[in-house]
Image: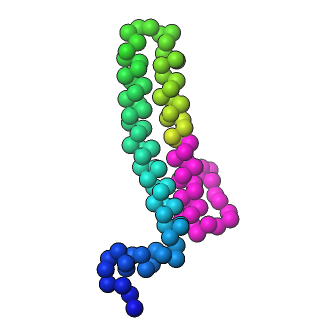
Amino acid sequence: MLPYTVTSFIWYFVKPYRYWFFAVIGLSLIWATNEALFAYYIKWIVDELTALHGNKGAISLLAIKPLVFIFVSWTLMDIAMRVQGFVMRGGDAEVSCAYP
């Protein structure tokens, strides 16, 4: 017999796949956090560059930290999306590349 409450009804169907389910939820949260922070990283670069007041020699030093954060978060997002695709396919051994 199926459960009557909403949460127990959902849990009834999720329970056999709970590890996969929570993995997909967690990876989706990583993706959403990265997307939210990307605009902040761009703002950070713009703020650093506008504070220079013509000192072109310091551009590379000030912009390197936000660029490293962008690279790391982009890499983590790409890994998370690939793992999420692997998990959503049910853990197939064959993992395809996201890009041609």
Number of residue marks: 0
Query: Would you say residue 46 sits in the magenta stretch?
Result: no
Query: Would you say residue 87 sits in the magenta stretch?
Result: yes
**Range shown magenta:** 75-100
Quadrant of image for the N terminus: bottom left
Q: Position of residue 21 (x, y in %)?
A: 49, 67
Q: Position of residue 33 (x, y in %)?
A: 42, 46
Q: Give the vertical position of 41 relative to 84 (above or below).
A: above
Q: Position of residue 68 (x, y in %)?
A: 53, 31
Q: Give the vertical position of 71 relative to 52 (above or below).
A: below
* Residue name at image x 57 percent, y 54 percent: 82
Q: Picture quarter containing residue 50?
A: top left
Q: Position of residue 94 (x, y in %)?
A: 68, 63
Q: Residue furthest left?
A: 5
* Residue name at image x 43 percent, y 53 percent: 29
* Residue name at image x 62 percent, y 50 percent: 100
Q: How is the image coloured?
A: rainbow
Q: Residue furthest right?
A: 93
* Residue name at image x 38 percent, y 36 percent: 39
